[in-house]
Image: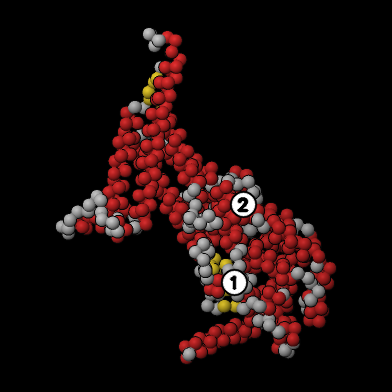
Amino acid sequence: LRYCPDEQAFIIRASTGFAERVMDHVCRATIDNFDKMLGWASYLRELGGLSSVVSKYMSVQRKGRPKLQETPQPGVESRYGGQGYYSVQVQAQAMADLLGAVRELRQCQVFRTVINTYDWLYEALEKHVDAKIRGLFESKEQQRLCRPSEALARLRSIQRALTFVEQHIMLNASDILRGALLRHFSNVAAGTIGAPLKTDTKSSAVIQKIGRFYWDLVNHGNTAFSPLKIHFATRAHGRRHHRDDVNAEDFTTHPELRALCHVVGPYGVKAVQSVLLSNLGSSIAEMKRIIAENSVYLGQLDFVDITSWENIVTKVNDKDSFLQLAVQVGRCLQLISTLKTAQRAVQENDIPFVSRIIELVMRRIDRDGKITPGPQLCNVLTDSGVEEPMYDQGLKAVFQRGFSSGVVLSHFPKMFACLFMSELWRSTRFQPESEAFSTGVESAIATIQTVIPAICSSREKSMGMLRDFVTLSAHALLHMNSKAEARDRAMRGYHIPSMMIFMSQFMETCKGMSMDVLEKCLPFTLMRTKIIEIYENLRAQTEEKGAA
C-alpha cells in the first residue's frame, strides 16, 4: 500500500473479498461433510443402524475372517454395510480436521475488517439446518408426507451431526436446531402453551401441510376409525391399488403419533390441532343450518307416542347430511384424541414430574366437585394432553360459535335421536370382527360426547343433555323395534341390533354416566338378545366358510 497509494481502496476490497471467498469455501466444505454424514447415517439406518453394522463387523474380526475392504465388491453393500461403516469414519475424520482448523483460526483480520469464523459457520449451518427441518416430512411422492417415524429418524441424524460439530468447536448447535423447529412447527397465532387455542390458517407451510394431510387422510372414503386398534385404518374393500395411495395405519398408529409429537413438540401439536379445527367451520355451520331449518318439527316431536313420533320424524329433512357431517366432525375429534394420548405418553416419558403434577391436579378436581378451574389452568391442562371438552377452550370457542343459539342448543339431542331413521343407518351393519360399523357411524359418538359438554355452561347441564339424548334414542329404538317385529315395510333394511350396539358403545365411553340411564328406557334383556343375534349369525357364517 505504501508504494501504490492510489490502489489502496482496490487492494483492501480485493483482499477482503478473497478472505470472504475463503470463508465461503470453508463453510461449503463443512456443509458438504455435514450432508455426507447425514447420507451415510440414512444408509446405515436402512441396514438396521450403526450398532448392528458395527456388531457384524466385529463378529467378522473375532472369527478370524478377512477384514472388510474399504471398496467392497458391487452388490455386497446392502448385504453387509461395511462401506457405510467406513464412510462414516472417513466423513467424521474429515469433519474433525476441518473443524479443528476453524477452531485454531477463530478470528482473522484483513486490514480493518475482522472476520469471525464462528459467526460465518454459525450462519451457514443455521440456513442449512433450517432447510433440512423444512423438508423433514418430505416424501418421494409430492402429494403425501413421509411417516412420522422416518421424520424422527431424520431429525435424530441431524441432531447427532450438530452434536458432533458442537463437540469440536464452541458453537451453540442446540439453539440452531431449536430455532428451526420453532419456526416450522409452531404457530404463535394459534396460541402459546397455556394460552387459549385459536383456529388460525396462517400457520407455517410445514404445519399447514401436516394438518391438511391428516384432515384429508381421516376424511377419505376408505378410512375408518378402529375402536379395537384405537387408530384409523384403511377398509378391506378399499385396498390400495396404486403405489401413491396412502395407508392410514402408516400415519395414525400410537407409535407414529408419538414420533410426530417428538418431532413437532407441544407447540406443534397445538398448531396441528388449530389447523384441524379450522377445517370444521363449514361442517359446523351446515349442521347449525339443518337444525335451524327443522326447529319447527323438532319442537313438535313426541318420542313417547309412536304415531306422533313416526309422523314428525319423517318430516325432518337432511338427516343423512347431518349424520355424515357428524361423522366427519367425529373423525377429526378422534384424531385429536389419539394425538393427545400420544402427547401424554411422550410427556410422561420425557418430563414425568409435569405429568405427575397434572395427574394430582385432575384427581383433586374430580374428588372435590366444587373446584372450577380458571381459564389459564384449563389451557395448561389441555396443552398437557388432558381430554376434557369442558376445559378445552379451543373446542369450546369453535363449537359455541356454531351452536350458541338457544333454539339450536335445545334441539341438539332431538336431532341426533332422529338420525336412526336416516338412509345411512339403513345401510349400516355392525362388524364384530373389527368392533366397528360398516359406514363409520361410530365416529358420531365422539361428536355427541364432545360437542354437548363444550357448548354447555356447566357439567350438570351437559349431563342433562346427554341423558336426554340417551332417553330419546332409547324411545326411538323401542318404536323401531316394535314396528320391525310387526314387519312394517317402513322398517325394511334397518338393522336394530346394530343400533343397540351403537347405544351400548355410547354408554361405555360416556364419562359420568352408567348403563342404568339406558336400561330405564331400553330393557337390557332386549339389548342382550339382539347383540347375541349378531354373534350367532357371525358364528354360523364362520362355520359355513369352514365347511366349504
* Element type where label 1 sits in the image: helix
**Residue at left 35%, top 49%?**
40
Tell me: 200 left or right of 186: right
**Residue at left 58%, top 46%?**
204
Task: Tell me residue 433's x, y (percent).
Answer: 52, 78
Task: Tell me residue 205's x, y (percent).
Answer: 57, 47
* Element type where label 2 sits in the image: helix
Q: Can residue 55 be seen by looking at this rendering?
A: no
- Which quadrant holds residue 72? bottom left
Is 300 located above or below residue 115 in the figure?
A: below
**Which residue is situated farthest in the left direction here?**
64
Instruction: Quickly name the residue at label 2.
Output: 274
Disc number placed over residue 329 in the picture, else none: none
**Residue at left 34%, top 27%?**
105
Crowd band around label 1 with a 10 angstrom C-alpha radius: few (<14), some (14–19), many (20+): few
Is 268 located above or below residue 21 in the figure?
A: below
What's the amino acid at mark 1?
Glu
The foreground one among 247 and 397 is 247
Instruction: Quickly name the residue at label 1.
Output: 508
Crowd band around label 2 with a 10 angstrom C-alpha radius: few (<14), some (14–19), many (20+): many
Tag 2 and tag 1, C-beta contact below 8 Å: no
The foreground one among 529 and 249 is 249
Q: CA distance from mark 2 to mark 1?
A: 29 Å
What's the amino acid at mark 2?
Ser
Task: Tell me residue 372's x, y (percent).
Answer: 65, 53
Is 413 located above or below residue 64 in the figure?
A: below
Between discs 2 and 1, the one toward the N terminus: 2
Tell me: 412 left or right of 187: right
Q: Can residue 236 be seen by looking at this rendering?
A: yes
